[in-house]
Amino acid sequence: MTEQVVRPLAVRSVGRSLERVDGHEKVTGAAAYAVEHGEADGVIDPLHVWLVQSTVARGRVARLRPEAALSHPGVVAVIDHSNAPRLRDTGNRELLILQDDAVGFRGQVVALVLAESAESAREGAALVDVSYEVEPHEAELREDNATYKPDSVNPDMDTDTEDGDVDAALAAAEVVVDHVYRTPYEHNNPLEPHATTAWWEDDAGREVLSMFDSTQGVHGVVESLAPLFGLEAEQVRVRAPYVGGGFGSKGEAHAHVVAAALAARTTKGRPVKLAVTRQQMFALTGYRTATISHLRLGATADGTLTAIEHAVQEQTSAIREYAEQTASPTRMMYAAPNRRTSHRLARLDVAVPSWMRAPGEMPGMFAHEVAMDELAVACGIDPLEVRERNEPDVDPETGRPFNNRRLLECLHRGAERFDWASRPPGPRATVDGDWWVGTGVASATYPAMKMPGNSARVRSLDDGRYAVAIGSVDIGTGARTVLTQIAADALDVEPGDIDLAIADTRLPPASVAGGSSGTSSWGTAIVAAAQRFRADHGPSPDPGVETTASAADDPAAEQYAFHSFGAVFAEARVNRWTGEVRVPRLLGVYSVGRVVNPMTARSQLLGGLVMGLSAGLFEESHRDPRFGHVVTQDLATYHVAAHADVLDLDAEWLEEADEVFTPMGSRGIGEIGIVGTAAAVANATFHATGVRVRSLPLTADRFLA
């Protein structure tokens, strides 16, 4: 494999609305998801696995009796800590299941039931008799217990930052905004629940673990499982040809993946299928931590910021640390000479939090953008103007120039489309029958990221066609389609001349589909391989020649601050008598580099806006601190936005090409749509009612005081 210095792409297919190349398979039901693979894929005569979960938040398994389950028709085996295959301790206690009798959170896997059918497995699991020695637990996030300082926050950012004298600047400020903003626990709810098919087989005398897994990164699953089972990476093969969404929750292996591999270890080569139920997902597959953000803004009378402080409190799990980078966007969003951010955690006896779409940016920008709206009100100026006055010349955090910061253009374009100029300056200025009506705005940002370790392979076929391979995963975003377009332009052929292979660890390595980094990382690798292929083999290669390459390090990465920006505008209607909130208009305008495929990009941005609307109005997981479990364990009690909640919704982007960042000129788009959306809705409800709500979701009761 070689490294290639990539050149900007001469675009022909990139920028066109190519229909999804896998659309036919998906709409006809031919696409096989993780537990739908059969004999054609080597999954012959599988057993089904059901999880038995702890019913206490902390303690030990005192006794586990499998007899009733084993006597149930169809049940083959029950695996618990007393008879499970041994794992090697890698330090990740979330994955180290069934190795002892300790219970670290309610919902932890304490046994597996294997049966001939999913129904028998489920019935058998209900018959496993488990009793516990219960120990005291703590499962409530409070301001007085979130005091632990982690070494870093996700992924490897500084926990705290400070520039200037924040306290002195706040004391001298003419205007001060000083409030606490809260976001609730939220759970990723992709269409396809987490699921795994696994089996062990012999490959030329060497043991191999094979899997179909619903994951955002097949190579990441190998990195997690191989050390646990004492295997080389080449002894684990993971495939994910079709994945029904993830929103971050499938960005790393969770305990159910280990459970499937452990169960398959005991079946003498017979495959096992494990599908996590919607209810089980609320305990086992990650979630967004609740956050408490104490924001203090100091400013002159005209709204120019002199100080910003963002102190965050959130929670992690006692069994494994995860710290969300909630204050990270505050560090670079607006200019102020004095700035301080911090993160503190409560270590609770609960499941491990993880990534959820725009981790850090979503809750952090909610707090910051509502605070900026409050600053505008306090100074008596327009919310657009307060953002204009605090636009930085360079990145406040690093001091580097922004490669492409067009936030003000997004704000102005959105204001034009939203008829912002006719907006009444104060709240409760517009009433329509029983409804107060208001509008609000918030800025959005997300870092432009490319992940290391990506390679691609190009092979010439007959008739001017090419086989392009990379181990990336399409989780429903359209990655297959946009990578086909990128490969076509890089090889100067039509998209129909590309045979793209993805989502298999037998292919060249690829990073996770996360951090809005997929197209940037994988596309750059494909362009590098194509350009290296042309340099090695020319424009008319013989069939069967191939090149594998990765992109060489780009020195520009250290010269600029790479971010995408956007502006979200919302209209809110609040019922004067019931407090019910409706959002009849929602608009996002974005600066995200060149859009590779307008059709799939629009889908992603609209999806982000809907998810932000959902977070603003509905989404809230309730954990009962007495017992340590989430009680809203289904889509009836954990409400997400439905068709009736989504009315006039639109997204557009500025025309541009960021060829310093990627050879395609693109930046990531998967997450910026959710950022700032809830804040725009909250600001609109204040403009409608004069009631300032600083906690999500914006439920009706908050407007009835």
Image (cartoon, rainbow, N blue to C red):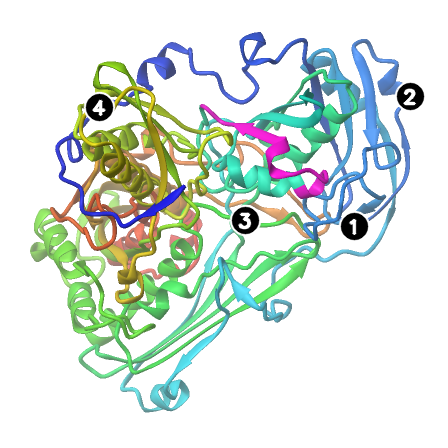
Compute the Cα span from label 1 to label 4: 55 Å
Give the Cα distance between marks 1 and 2: 25 Å
Quarter holding the C terminus is: bottom left
Q: In the image, is residue 237 part of the stretch drawn in magenta?
A: yes
Of helix, strand and loop, which one carries label 3? Answer: loop
Q: Are marks 3 and 4 in contact (CB under 8 Å)?
A: no
Q: From mark 3 to mark 1, how far is it between C-alphas?
A: 20 Å
Q: Which residue is drawn at the image coordinates 73% and 44% (left, top)?
A: 96
Mark before the other along the chain sequence, 3 or 2: 2
Return the residue at label 3. Answer: 354
Q: Secondary structure at mark 4?
A: helix
Q: Is residue 440 left or right of residue 321?
A: left
**Residue that mark 2 sits on:** 67
Q: Which mark is residue 495?
A: 4
Give amino acid for label 1.
Arg
Label 1 Cα neighbours within 10 Å, binned few <14 / some 14-19 / many ≥20: many
At label 3, the amino acid type is Ser
Kindly report which numbered mark, 1 or 4, lies closer to the viewer in this rendering: 4
